[in-house]
Image (cartoon, helix red, strand yellow):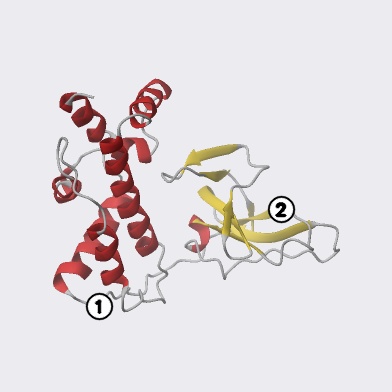
């Protein structure tokens, strides 16, 4: 593969992970990645960085990252081999905050991570003022699972800061149908189920899905109206 082709492919890896490419562009990139070890390594570098930043952005307001978080992030990045084709991985990281197409969630997560790594300050989340909504919609999340194979099911998403401990499903009738009912404000939410605290799976009954950037899909629910109190 020519250096120019690899450079072009690597410029769009972030768009590829965030699901912003068309089906044709995605197919072209995947065809190139299947036969180019250097671009495969670049993709792995990006996935490692995004996974680390996702863990940071999903930290709740009441939680602090572990004391060795910075060391783990730097260790993962340091383990990656340098990329010799096209723009370097660190060059792209340096310019992440200036890329217009970069989503806000990655910009915020990257900025927070850099503060931790280079300034050494403790991350502090200030309480956010919240107003009580005028109306809420009751949404029931349902998952079919054999109780002999699954011990616990949690629903996580934008509505609970992706916290696996906040909303657990129950199977009160022991019929293999696990449910939990939440009161949510109107809006758009991405969510997934977590089985036994480890296996992340999208809702098989959802009407819509979006790419989560790591080879999986988040289910999407949109609430346009609700019953007012």
Return the residue nearer the eye: 210 or 136.
210
Residue 99 is situated, as x and y percent measured from the top left of the image, at 19, 41
Q: Is residue 15 above or below residue 123?
A: above
Which mark, residue 143? 2
Q: Quadrant of the N terminus?
A: top left
Cα distance in 3D space between marks 2 and 1: 39 Å
Q: Give the labeled residue for mark 1.
A: 122
Residue 121 is situated, as x and y percent measured from the top left of the image, at 20, 76
Question: Looking at the image, is mark 2 or mark 1 earlier in the sequence?
Answer: 1
Given the current orientation, which residue lies at the most extreme top position?
A: 24
Q: Is residue 130 above or below residue 85?
A: below
Residue 64: image quadrant is: bottom left
User: Mark 2, residues whose alpha carbon is within 10 Å: few (<14), some, or many (≥20)?
Assistant: many
Return the residue nearer the eye: 82 or 88.
82
Residue 220 is situated, as x and y percent measured from the top left of the image, at 55, 44
Mark 1, secondary structure of its residue: loop
Return the residue nearer the eye: 217 or 101.
217
């Amino acid at each position: 593969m020519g250096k120019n082709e690899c450079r072009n492919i690597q410029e769009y890896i972030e768009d590829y992970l965030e699901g912003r490419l068309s089906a044709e562009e995605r197919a072209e990139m995947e065809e190139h990645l299947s036969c180019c070890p250097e671009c495969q390594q670049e993709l792995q570098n990006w996935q490692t960085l995004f996974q680390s930043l996702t863990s940071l952005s999903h930290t709740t307001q009441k939680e602090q990252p572990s004391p060795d978080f910075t060391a783990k992030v730097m260790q993962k990045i340091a383990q990656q081999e340098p990329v010799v084709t096209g723009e370097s991985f660190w060059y792209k990281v340096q310019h992440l905050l200036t890329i217009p197409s970069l989503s806000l969630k990655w910009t915020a997560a990257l900025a927070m991570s850099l503060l931790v790594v280079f300034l050494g300050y403790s991350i502090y989340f200030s309480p956010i003022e919240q107003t009580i909504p005028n109306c809420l919609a009751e949404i029931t999340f349902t998952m079919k699972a054999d109780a002999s194979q699954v011990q616990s099911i949690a629903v996580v998403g934008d509505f609970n800061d992706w916290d696996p401990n906040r909303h657990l499903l129950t199977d009160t009738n022991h019929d293999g149908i696990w449910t939990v009912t939440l009161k949510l404000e109107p809006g758009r939410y991405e969510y997934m189920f977590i089985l036994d605290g480890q296996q992340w799976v999208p809702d098989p009954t959802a009407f819509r899905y979006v790419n989560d950037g790591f080879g999986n899909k988040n289910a999407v629910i949109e609430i346009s109206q609700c019953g007012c109190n």
